[in-house]
Amino acid sequence: MRRRSTTVVLGLATLALTVLPGCSTSSSTPATAASAPAGSAKPKTASDDAKPTNILTSAQLRGRLLDEGDLGQGYTREPEQEFSHDDVTVIGCPALEQLGGDAATGGSFDFANKAEAAFTYEGSTDSEVGEELYSDTETKLCQGTGRIFDAMVSCPTYQIVAGSTPVKITTQKLTAPALGDEQWSQLLTFTAGGQSSVFKQTAIRSGTLLVIISGPPGLVDTHIDKALTKAESSSWPPVHQRGPAAG
């Protein structure tokens, strides 16, 4: 159940990018916590000179993903796996139901370019960490990500049926770390077959780059800053000194 749940949650992080309408926020006017509850903006820091302003290619994004050395000893990268999206049904959440199973599990995307990776710690799915990098215009990243997280937290409890397996999902909006230009975060609990798994998702937009880390809450908190720093930098370790996060 846990491997299946992780695959689903990584897809849900990017659901319906092709079918959701755009927001009116311009790239030069980041959404504030009052106007866009799913995300927030922070003052500029010394790292602003590193944020991408051009759309990165998928090859560039792949080179900026975390690797085993970045995560620490004991982590192993998982092979990429195909996941069938056409047997997933969403129940009890109108904002997600109308998108259909394919969109709700990340079967289609509208952001220009992407790269992703998943890691386990010494073979334990309890310590699985997933990373997704996307690049597109600032406006499209703002539109899609804000509406995705709004849709997901609009229903505190809902259910998905993957094949013949019902999975109950509860969601809770969290305060995201003050990184990048915009931030979103949520906690998801998956319950199936009498077992529960808790996952955290944090998304950070920096210019034309979107970083999403998913996994156990403690691991997401540990790796999100490092993931953003590496993704922002064309070289690694970064040649610039990151400024302190706004409190």
Image (spheres, rainbow, N blue to C red):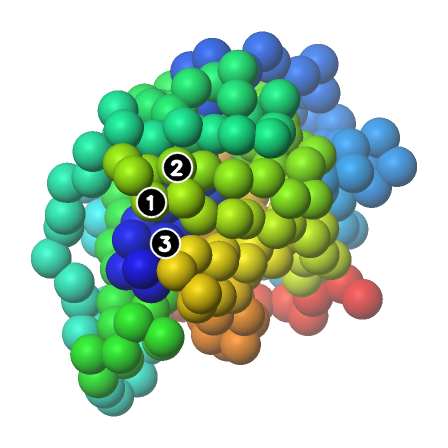
Q: Which residue is mark 3?
A: 5
Residue 178 as seen in the image, left or right of residue 231: right
Identify whether 230 is placed above or below 140.
below
Q: Which residue is mark 2?
A: 161
Q: Looking at the image, can residue 182 be seen?
A: no
What is the C-alpha distance between the residues marked 2 and 3? 11 Å
Tell me which corner region of the image, top left, top right, bottom left or bottom right, holds residue 58: top left
Q: Looking at the image, can residue 33 be seen?
A: yes
Identify the amino acid type marked 2. Answer: Val
Evaluate if marks 2 and 1 touch, with contact meaning CB atoms under 8 Å apart.
yes
Residue occupying the point 53% across, 15% down:
98
Residue occupying the point 16% across, 63% down:
78
Q: Which residue is mark 1?
A: 165
Identify the amino acid type marked 3. Answer: Ser
Residue occupying the point 39% across, 60% down:
193
In this view, the residue in front, 9 or 1, is 1
What is the C-alpha distance between the residues marked 3 and 1? 11 Å
Residue 61 as seen in the image, left or right of residue 179: left
Q: How many marks?
A: 3
